[in-house]
Image (cartoon, rainbow, N blue to C red):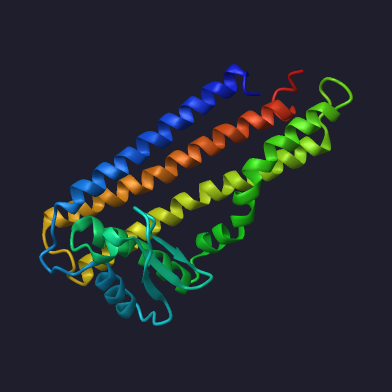
Amino acid sequence: MLFDPLYIIIFVVGIVLSGGASLMVKKAFAQGQKVMIRTRLTGMEVAHRILDAEGIDDVQVVEHQGFLSDHYNPMSKTLALSPDVYHGSNASAVGVAAHEVGHAIQHARSYAPLGLRSLLVPAAQFGSSLGPWLVIIGMFLGSAPGNVHIVSVIGVGLFAAASLFSLVTVPVEFDASRRAKACLSTLGVTQTGEEDAAVSKVLTAAGLTYVAAAVVALMNLVYWAFRAGLLGGRDD
C-alpha cells in the first residue's frame, strides 16, 4: 500500500491539512497572548469562575505540563491546563481555559455528542491502526477477484468507527467554544472587542484542526473501503 499512488496522495493531503491547521493554531495562540485582558484574570481563575457560575463543584482544575496540552477528563472530572494557559492573563489563555470548561459543562449537562465520543474512544485508539491491517489480511484471504472477505469488512468497520469519532469530535469542539465565548462575555471576563476577537480567532483555529482530522479520516475510510472491495470492486 505504501507504493499505491492514491494512498500517497491521501497521505500528502493529510500532512498538508494537519500541518496547516496546527500552524494556524500556534500563530493564533501567539497573537492572542499579546492581547492582555483588562480583568487580569488567569486561565485558572477564569476556569474556576465559570465552573462556579455554572454550579459545577466537582471538577478539579490542575496544571498540566506541555504546550497546548489542555484537556478535560470526564472520567476523573479533571480540567488540566498547560502552564501558558493556567498562569496566563491574555486572550489565548482565557479562551482555551474557557473552552475546556465548556467540555466540563457538556459533561455536567449530559451533552449527547460528548457521550457518544466517549463511547468511541476505544475505536479511535485501535480502529485506525488495526483496521487497515485487517483489510490487507482479508485481501490475501479472498479466494477470487471481486470476493470481499469478512476480515476486510471487519477492518473497514473498525476504521469507520474511528472515523466516526473524528466526525463527532467536530460539533463537540465547536459547541465547547460556543459555550466558552458566551461565558466569557456573560461574566465580563472579556471586556473589549479586541479581546473577544482574539479569543474567537484562537478557538476557531483550534476547531479547524478537528475539521482537518475529520476530513483526513474520511479520505482514509473511503480508500480502505475501496481497497477492501466495498466500493467499486477489489483491485487485485
Residue that lies at the very extreme toward the right in this rendered image: 143
Residue 120 makes an appearance in the image: no
Name the residue located 69 percent from the left edge and 40 percent from the top edge: 131
Where residue 159 sits: x, y (%)? 65, 42
Left or right, 67 with respect to 171, comes to left
Left or right, 64 with respect to 152, comes to left
Q: Quadrant of the C terminus?
A: top right
Left or right, 236 with respect to 57, comes to right
Count of numbered labels shown in the rendering: 0
Q: Quadrant of the N terminus?
A: top right
Where residue 45 sits: x, y (%)? 25, 73
User: Closer to the camera, 156 or 40?
Assistant: 40
Name the residue located 81 percent from the left edge and 30 percent from the top edge: 148
Q: Quadrant of residue 7?
A: top right
> With respect to residue 61, does 233 lie above or below?
above
Name the residue located 32 percent from the left edge and 38 percent from the top edge: 23
Name the residue located 51 percent from the left edge and 35 percent from the top edge: 216
User: Closer to the camera, 87 or 197?
Assistant: 87
> With respect to residue 78, does 131 lie above or below?
above
Where residue 73 sits: x, y (%)? 48, 66
> With respect to residue 130, does 171 lie above or below?
below
Residue 143 makes an appearance in the image: yes
User: Closer to the camera, 74 or 89?
Assistant: 89
Q: Quadrant of residue 37?
A: bottom left
